[in-house]
Image (tube, helix red, strand yellow):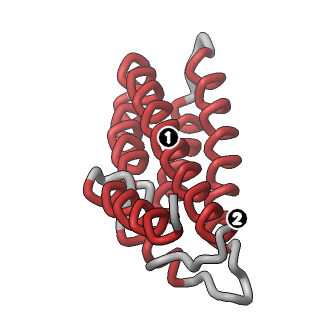
Amino acid sequence: MDLAQLQRQLVDYKTSLYHEDFLDEQFTQLQELQDENNPDFVVEVVSLFFEDSDRLLNELTKALEQQSVDFKSVDAHVHQLKGSSSSIGAQRVQKVCIAFRNYCEEQNVEGCLKCLQQVRHEYSLVKTKLEFMFQLQQQILSAGGSIPM
């Protein structure tokens, strides 16, 4: 595939992520903070999001497996996940977190478990899609091209 095709593929792919609500304008703002002094800014921030999310999802799983669920603790973890997903523009993860917090408030274990599954699913999707987008960007840079905005 030539450089122009790769760049077109990247633009189309990124556009689809916005149309399918995986990303919102917050991701665009994140990209605007990246410059030649810090060319890996977005990848670094998103990688931190991945690490943080993996940790929080494990904490949530453990917390919801307890005989007596500490809903305050679960809600705090969900609140953190909602904040970090919001900060990178992972819109669908953020939306599930909002519903998740409502179930925490109601102290509804079943609802929380259902939301945990949903948030894992949405997180997994956005992670796969962002990793693919970063791979495309890397291919473009390796071919000597620039990333189209």
Q: Earlier in the sequence, mark 2 or mark 1?
A: 2
Q: Which residue is mark 1?
A: 123
Dot 1 falls on a residue whose secondary structure is: helix
Horizontal and vertical percent for residue 68? 58, 16
Residue type at the position of mark 1: Tyr
Q: Is residue 46 above or below residue 76?
A: below
Residue 55 numbered mark, or none: none
Residue at 65% from the left image edge and 69% from the top image edge: 143
Residue type at the position of mark 2: Glu
* Residue nearest the viewer, comparing 104 with 49: 49
Q: Does residue 31 appear to the left or right of 97 in the view shown?
A: right
Dot 2 falls on a residue whose secondary structure is: helix
Residue 102: image quadrant is top left
Residue at 49% from the left image edge and 40% from the top image edge: 123
Q: Is residue 61 above or below residue 80?
A: above
Residue at 45% from the left image edge and 71% from the top image edge: 4
Residue 8: image quadrant is bottom left
Numbered disc total: 2
Horizontal and vertical percent for residue 28? 43, 74
The 10 Å Cα crowd at callout 1, few under 14, some 14 to 19, many 20 or more, is many
Q: Which residue is mark 2?
A: 44
Question: Distance between the Cα atoms at labels 2 and 1?
Answer: 17 Å
Residue 25: image quadrant is bottom left
Horizontal and vertical percent for residue 10? 44, 63
* Residue nearest the viewer, comparing 86 with 125: 125
Residue at 48% from the left image edge and 51% from the top image edge: 82
**Quadrant in the picture for the C terminus:** bottom left
Q: Is residue 68 above or below residue 107?
A: above
* Residue nearest the viewer, comparing 12 with 18: 12
Q: Does residue 67 appear to the left or right of 48 in the view shown?
A: left
